[in-house]
Image (cartoon, rainbow, N blue to C red):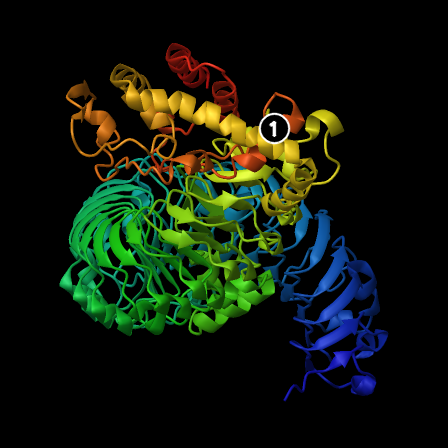
Amino acid sequence: MDVRMSGPVPDVFKNMISLEHLDLSYNGLEGGIPKYLGNMSSLMYLDLRKNNLIGEFSELTTNLSWPIEKKLQYLDLSYNSISGLISNISRFSFLKELKLGGNKLNGSIQEGYLKFPHLIALDLSSNRITGSVPDLSVYPSLKELLLDQNMFSGNLTESVGVLSKLEVFLIGSNLLEGIITEVHMLNLYRLRVLDLSNNTFLMMQLNPNWVTPFQLEYLDLRNCKLGPYFPLWLKTQRELVYIDISSAGISDIIPSWFGSVSPKLVYLNTSNNQIYGVFPEFSFSKMGYSGSSRLFFRPSETILDLSRNKISGLIAFLCQTTDWVLIDLSDNMLSGQIPDCFSNFEGLMHLNLANNHFTGEIPFLFGDLTSLSLLHLRNNSFSGGLPTSMRNCTNLIVIDLGENRLTGQIPAWMGDSFSELMVLILRSNQFYGSIPSNLCGLANIQLLDLSSNKITGAIPECVHNYTAMTQTMNDEFIVSVVESQFPIMDRWLLVQTKPFESAYFMWKGKEVKYMNHIGLVKVIDFSSNNLAGEIPSDITKLVGLVGLNISNNNLTGFIPRDIGEMKSLNFLDFSRNHLSGGIPTSVSDLNYLGVLDLSYNNLSGRIPQSNHALTFDASSYIENYGLCGKPLNKSCPGDESHGDPSSTVDGDDALKEGESEDEELITEGFYIAMALGFIVGFWGIFGTILLNKACTCVVLKSILNPPLFRRASLLKLFSFFQLSRTESLNRDGHTCTLPLEVLTNGGRDSSFTFGFDSAAAPLALNGIIPAATSPRDAQDNKRLRFFVSSYSQMNRRRHQPNPQYDTVSESALLISISSLFSAKTPNFTRFETLIRSIFTAI
């Protein structure tokens, strides 16, 4: 039950003039500060943090006038929506704690505005305050100073060094510059927490032999200029619990003393430097901690981030403790196998060993890591299959095993055990077999990458069960998902580890890093496998997909007609398959589509001519000889007489329209002419070839030479020849020697034969379809299209593109047949010359 107050600050406290302590924090209070609070002469403590108070700071504090200003010692207005300059506050001369963090305060701090001689805590963090840091010597009693996440600029005042009672100093995430020296820390004897992080132009130049006057518990120097050498003064810090020196420009060998820098250490981050060498035996805390730094992180969670360095050697140093929550050793030069001590890491939630040189199998002991949520092992040399024990890791959200040497079939139990899985990346391994239908049980999957393996079979029909891909999720939903999956991890840990910040996948042969929440990356990548069959029509129900890549397979059939329903698509790659039919007009509805690749297929018909579809260049459609229209330099049937079409039709619609038009052209004279042309043309030419042995050899040698045969799909055209796996054709004692490479399709296909069938001879031309246009008269072209209703194309693997395997263009083939069969007298020299010239030209 929610018992929080809402609305304006209630008047119920109006007559409580003797009240000394008023805490209204963590409510839903709105508006400003009522004037009656200024009349509460005894009030010493006022806490209004975490509400919805609004207004100018000067107006709010005006309401807190005499007599309260002579009594008030604690004022907390943090995490509201208070704006404006910090002014009209110095009259509260007895203030000891002033907390204004998490508001919208702006402008610079004028000298004298914050003159509080008794002040022990000042929090101005997370505002928009500009200018330089004011003189701090006016706060001799200050213990906590929080100025982080503002826009302070210039050099840090050396007056901070006189604050001998200062324990907590946070000034990270500002625009400070200059040099920090020993003078800035000269008298900070009690300093326990120091945060100078994210001041990219701030440089620390401390004497290597300097002995610090303090013992830090919390140190955050990330994104400062700390290097190039390892900070030797850390050697004296024996109380450190938290160290973050990531992205600090350190290019040095790991010192041997660093392994025992502090026996209380539970958090270490040295990522994104150039640290090299073997990591020493390390001592992490095995007990809880209750120091002042508890306010700033969760000390019971042991975290190690050494990523993006040049650290080498083995990882046995991890065995010194068992309390790991996060281990990130990615992007180093570490090697060896995963040690057995990992079975003791029962609380480990995030393991990242990506981009190293680890070998061996994924150990069976991984099944003991039942708390594991994020597993990154990509780009190593792990081998073998996935251990069945991993089915115990039911909390897994991210699995990235890409770019290893893993083998075997994709386990069916993954779909049953990993119900919370959002990311599964198995690309660039040696997995084989079909995609198990159980994988459709991954209802929460957001990124599924099985590319570059040896997977066969069809795309499962049940892909529509990927429920998370059927909806568009906003940031609030993703946050709720993350929080539900990380119940023991607080906001701080999520911010520090950033487990959902990026994902890798392949696009057009290049690795792409998607910088965003993983929950917003909805991608399916099945490319570069041996998948066959048709694209499931229900895949169009995945309307939340951002990317779909099924290129470099053996898929057949049509592009789903309703693909336009997938309106979230940003990139779509169906290239290098055997897809046929037309491009659905609904492609024009994909308004967010940035990359489209349908090249190297058997598509036909007009390319959709919508404004968005025309933003893609010709490379998106090349090597589809039946396609026409912009952006290809190839007109469509009827364009010559009717001009450019004002509307678009897909391949199926174009075929229906073409058939109705063709019927109007059919007359009795046409049928008679067709019959006479067939008798004279077909039997005049090929009858001579069959009866004349010399002509037979000449024609076969000229047409069936390897380069020509690989480029032309003339199997049905010459189906009356009996040609099998032999090096010669012997007819009536006459031997015509043919290259063996011809008979075996260049060594790629030894199974084909030419078979003679006299009954099928009149239908030989039905194996050639002129689906493309001809520069000849449009009416004659349509008559020929009606007669030659289909054509055969040699089966070729499109994921190994090579010009010599490309199929003859349909328009050139149409011209050749029209010219050849219109000849009154067969001329075999002309036949050979014509065919050669056609294939030379294309």
Viewer-side residue, 648 vs 57: 648
Q: Point out the residue furthest to the bottom here.
A: 1
Q: Type of residue at label 1?
A: Asn
Viewer-side residue, 605 vs 438: 605
Viewer-side residue, 571 vs 353: 571
**Residue 556, how many percent across, how many down?**
43, 48
In the image, residue 547 above or below residue 411: above
Q: Quadrant of the N terminus?
A: bottom right
Q: Residues within 10 Å of mark 1 (few under 14, many from 20)?
A: many
Viewer-side residue, 363 vs 651: 651
Q: Quadrant of residue 283?
A: bottom left
Residue at image coords 20%, 22%: 739
Q: Which residue is mark 1?
A: 781
Residue at image coords 53%, 48%: 160
Q: Quadrant of residue 24?
A: bottom right
- Label 1: state its secondary structure: helix
Count of numbered tags: 1
In the image, residue 752 above or below residue 27: above
**Residue 199, how many percent across, how many down?**
52, 42
Q: Is residue 155 left or right of residue 716?
A: right
Q: Is residue 405 left or right of residue 31?
A: left
**Residue 793, how many percent across, how many down?**
40, 36
Residue 611 seen in the figure: yes
Residue 198 seen in the figure: no
**Residue 789, how many percent across, how many down?**
52, 39
Q: Is residue 548 left or right of residue 799?
A: right
